[in-house]
Image (cartoon, grey):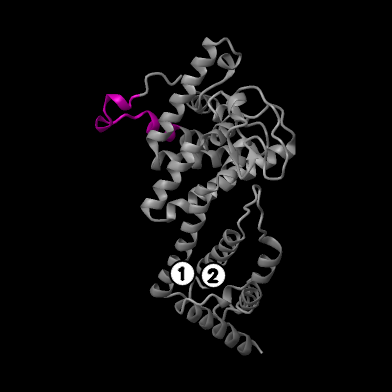
Amino acid sequence: MIMDYMNIFSMITFSLVLWVCLNVRLPLVPACYKTQIASSKDDPEFPSHKANYREFLHVTSKFHQPIPIQDIAIQKKIHHTYRLQFLKDVVLARALDDSTFNVLNSLIIFNQIDIINHVQQDAMFLREILSLYVNEEVLMGGNKDEKRGEMEVDGKPIGVQANGSTLPERPFSFGPPDNLPENELVIRREVLALIQQLCIMGKNVPLAARVSLFRSLVSRGILFAVQWAFSLSEKDPGSKSTMSVAGEVMSALLEHDLNGVRNHITKQASAIDRESKEGRTMGAQAETLLRIMCKVLVQSRDLALQCQVGDALKTMLDISPKDGPDMTPVSID
C-alpha cells in the first residue's frame, strides 16, 4: 500500500512537470488542480510525513478583496498566478529542473504584468483605495466644490464609491478622521497589505513595467496610506505590524521613484503654507510625511521600525551631486 502511494506521488509529480513544460493550463483548473495537489501529499523521501495540501487549499487559503476588482479576467489571472506560485514554491520545489523552473517563472511574470497594468489603468480602484486614507479635497487640489460635478469615473461623481455609497464629508486634512471604529481600521490595514503585495509583485516584473507601476502609485497619492500607518500609535495591538508594512512600502517607493516621493512632500508643505495663509485650521494641524517619519524615528521603541524609517529618511534626504541644486527641496517642513 505504501509503495502504491509513492508511485502515485511520482506519477502526479511527473505529470505536473510535464504539463508545465508543455505550457498547458488544464491542471490549473480548480477541480483538476486540487485533485492533483491532494494526490501529491505522499512524498517517498518522507514516508512518515504527509503534506496537508488539501486542507491548506480548502481551509487556510482564502481569496479576500478589501477593495473589489471588478474585472473577472483579472481575478482569474490572480487565481492562476497563485496556483503557479504554490506549485513552484511548495509542491514541485524539489522536483523542478532549471528549464521547468524558468517556464513557471515566465508564466507567473506574464500574469503579474497583466495584473499590474490593470491596476494602473483602473482609476476607480485606485480612487477607492485613496479615499480610505485622505480627504478627497486634498487629491483635487482644494477645489472640491468646483470640480465635484465636472470629474466623473464610469458615469459616477468622484465622491461616489463603486457600491453606490457617498464618501462622508471630512475636514481638509492629510489623513482620515480620528477615532475610527475597529472595522474601519481593519479595512485600512488590509488595503495597506494589498499595496505591499502589489509592490512585491512589481519588483519581479521587467524594469519598464516596474518603473511605470511605482511612478503611477506615487503620482496617484499612495503615500497617503503610508503616512496614515506611520501616524498610528504603537500602543495599539495591530499598529506595529501595520507600521512595518508601511516601512516596506516606503522603501520600495523610494527605491524606484525617489524624486516622486520628494515632490509629494514638497507639495504637502506648499499646501500647508497655502492653507495657513488663508487662515484655515488645517495649516496649523496638518503634518507632512517627512515630519511624521521623523517623529516615528524619535519616539518609536521598535528597533526594526526605527531602522526602516532611518534608512528611508537617509535615502530621501541624501542629495547626490548628480541631482543638482534644483533637486534640493526648498521647504519640506
Secondary structure under the numbered disc 1 in the rendered image: helix
Residue 40: x %, y % from top left: 60, 78
Residue at 50%, 20% (x, y): give it.
271
Residue span colored magenta: 310-328
For marks 1 and 2 on the same chain, the one whose residue lies earlier in the sequence = 2
In x, y percent, where is residue 7? 58, 88
Query: Which residue lies under the disc numbered 1?
Result: 104
Instruction: Inspect the image, locate mark 2, and give the three-letter code of the amino acid beneath it.
Output: Leu
Residue, x 46% and y 57% (percent of image)?
A: 113
Residue type at mark 1: give it. Answer: Leu
In the image, which disc is placed on residue 87?
2
Mark 2 crowdedness (10 Å alpha carbons): few <14, some 14-19, many ≥20: many
The answer to whether residue 252 is seen in the rendering is: no
In x, y percent, where is residue 182?
74, 37
Answer with left or right where residue 3 lies relative to residue 200.
Answer: right
Going 59% across and 44% down the picture, which residue do you hit?
124
